[in-house]
Amino acid sequence: MLIQKTANETYNIEERKGVKMADRVIVRQDSEFRTQFMAEGEADSAKGKMEAVEQLHQLNPYSMMLSSLGSCTAIVLNTYAQYHHLKLEEVEIHLQYNRNYKKDCETCEEVGNYTEEMVEEILLKGKLSQDERQKLLHIAHACPIYKMFKEGIPIKTSLLG
């Protein structure tokens, strides 16, 4: 099955079967909420090379999901730090989505039995005490997107028309 990637590019979803997939994103946000996104390009995933994301079509759905979590977390952390006068200068969040397609395709008809995980690593830059750093780590989990992933959210699907 071919999937449209950009206006001029496609990739074959069958090529992903049998491989471990790991999408990686870095979200960097300063104390003025200026945000940068970095992601692995399809061609660069084996090399681990990250490139700046300038347009939405550079991200696949998994990278968009990671970017949502990272940007939400960064906003929550920066907002909290400003409100509490913490000297947080920048937040850098490294996110990775892991899925083993080979194992999942053995039972792919059984939706919900996928082997998935997200890894989130948070780098806090600024003059922060260890207590402030721990408090910010705790506050990171107040992000609404984090809560949706952690607790789940019902999705009601129907056909239109």
Image (cartoon, rainbow, N blue to C red):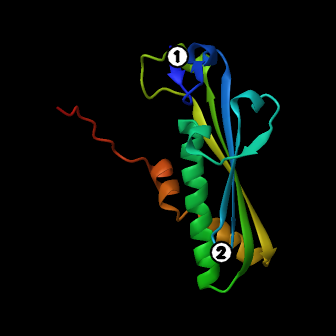
Residue positioned 62% across, 64% down in the render: 74
Instruction: Kindly identify the amino acid type of the residue bearing the numbered disc 2.
Output: Glu
Q: Residue at x 48, y 17 (%)?
A: 108
The percent coordinates of residue 20 (x first, y second) are 67, 24
Q: Image quarter for residue 156?
A: top left
x and y percentages locating residue 115 in the rendered image: 57, 29
148 or 91: which is nearer to us? Answer: 91
Q: Is residue 27 left or right of residue 48?
A: left
| Residue 95: % across, % down | 67, 47
Question: Image height check: is 98 above or below 56?
Answer: above
Residue nearer the viewer, 66 or 57: 57
Residue type, numbered disc 1: Leu
Q: Tell me the quarter of the image containing the C terminus.
A: top left
Which residue is disc 1 drawn over?
2
Q: Which numbered dot is residue 83?
A: none
Q: Residue at image x 56%, y 18%? A: 13
Using residue 10 as the reference point, say whether residue 156 is left or right of it: left
Q: Position of residue 23 (x, y in %)?
A: 66, 36
